[in-house]
Amino acid sequence: MFPSLLPAHVERGFSPEDSTVTLTFVAGYKWICAHSDGAPQEWIGTMAHYVVGGGFMQPLGVGGCATILMPPENAELFVRHGWTKANIREALFEATRRSVEWIKREGFKVQMQRGRLEAVEAGDEDSFMAISGSGTADDLLIVPCGGPAGAWPYYLYGGMKAVTRRIGART
């Protein structure tokens, strides 16, 4: 349906013909309204605002992952402008990226088991985190799905890397 937005299983190394299942841990979600975003950068800005503003960048610490459930209306916006999932991932990663110094100063948790408002330490300005406490844009899954119900993407955040496995009947 969206040729420039490869299926998740193909991005994860499987062939287009393979049947797969992808599992990830979901700690929570944010339902976001992106109806008025007419350009990819506007959509990225809206998502980043809610991801960072909601404190969803680091609640589960470094090594986390996140998933965007992207409705067809949003997926079509990116396809129309020539974006791929890699472009979306990188743009959202960069838009949510903050230094550990900023994270501590603004009162977010660096890791779930640590307190808020930790003291800033030397080197914190040179260490960065982004979506779900991740150190890489590759920790964001983007899944176009759903029906023509409007531009209501879901941001799912969790604490473990997604795992994809081939499934099917054994012969």
Image: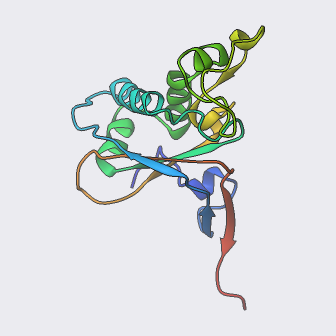
- Please state the horizontal and vertical placement of residue 132, each as a whole percent of the image: 59, 38
| Total marks in image | 0
Residue 57: which quarter of the image? Answer: top right
Relative depth, front residue between 113 and 25: 113
Residue 22: which quarter of the image? Answer: bottom right
Asked which colour scheme the image uses, the reply is rainbow
Left or right: 29 with respect to 104? left
Left or right: 18 with respect to 55? right
Residue drawn at x 65%, y 30% is 115
- Please state the horizontal and vertical placement of residue 147, each as a whole percent of the image: 29, 60
Relative depth, front residue between 23 and 55: 55
In the rendered image, the residue lying farthest to the bottom is 171
Residue drawn at x 61%, y 57% is 25
Image quarter (top left, top right, bottom left or bottom right) of the N terminus:
bottom left
Left or right: 113 with respect to 19? right
In the rendered image, the residue lying farthest to the right is 122
Q: Is residue 14 above or below residue 151?
A: below
Image quarter (top left, top right, bottom left or bottom right) of the C terminus:
bottom right
Residue 117: which quarter of the image? Answer: top right
Left or right: 122 with respect to 131? right
- Please state the horizontal and vertical placement of residue 61, each as a whole percent of the image: 67, 37
Residue drawn at x 40%, y 57% is 145
- Please state the horizontal and vertical placement of residue 67, each as a whole percent of the image: 52, 48
